Image (cartoon, rainbow, N blue to C red):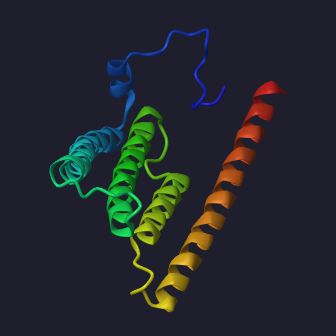
Amino acid sequence: MSDRTPDPHRPQPSARELWRGFTLYEKFEHVVIGVLTGVIAVVIVAALWNLVLRVFTSLVLADVFDPTEPAVFQMVFGAIFTTVIALEFKRSLLVAAERRFGVVQVRVVVLIALLAVVRKFILLDLTETEAPKVFALGAAVLALGAVYWLVRDQDRREREAERRSEQG
């Protein structure tokens, strides 16, 4: 079996035992991931709180919340996407902390970049945005989508090869 695949017949080591087995650098990575996870959690809570306050004050107090209004739609979905991007980033850090291989996973970075560009598209005011900027953002989405597809396809092929090697 590989280092990544746990043996279902052997009891799993505790977190303390795993920590003792880490190199100094792996311990450093895990501490950094823990701190970043905490900071991102605070950012997520603040972004969610800001979104709830904006919607609540616009809807209840000011009675001007009209989701069909482009500016309101952009504000709400921009805030939602900001929160989703932060959640995805936090999840990628937690996944990296649980596994014993590289912190940076290209697929996750590309996905987060893709979400950020899509968020930018939602926030764009097309009446005031120049065509080259829209073209550049469109090209960025296509390029990131292609890279994501290639990386995902490569990950799938590696998993299949690993499964075949374990079976035979």
- Judging depth in this view, the residue of 11 and 69 nearest the camera is 69
Above or below residue 159? Residue 103 is below
Report the residue at 47% width, 35% height from top.
Answer: 99
Q: Is residue 7 left or right of residue 111?
A: right
Percent position (x, y) of residue 15? 35, 21
* Residue at position x 38%, y 61% in the image: 73
Q: Residue furthest front?
A: 63
Q: How many marks?
A: 0
- Asked if residue 146 is positioned above or below residue 17 in the image, the reply reads below
Residue at the left extreme, as displayed = 61
- Nearest the camera: 49 or 69? 69
Quadrant holding the N terminus: top right
Image coordinates of residue 10 in percent, x first then y, are 56, 10
Residue 76 at x, y = what percent? 34, 56
Answer with the quarter of the image where residue 70 lies. bottom left
User: Does residue 23 sit above or below 144 in this rendering?
Assistant: above
Q: Which residue is found at the position 45% from the left and 81% from the top?
A: 126
Extreme residue toward the right, this view: 168
Q: Give percent across and percent down for residue 63.
A: 22, 53
Check the image and report above or below for 10 versus 30: above
Residue displayed at 70% across by 40% down: 159
Pick the quarter of the image with the C terminus: top right
The residue lying toward the viewer, choosing from 151 and 21, is: 151
Q: Pick whichever, 49 or 18, lies toward us.
A: 49
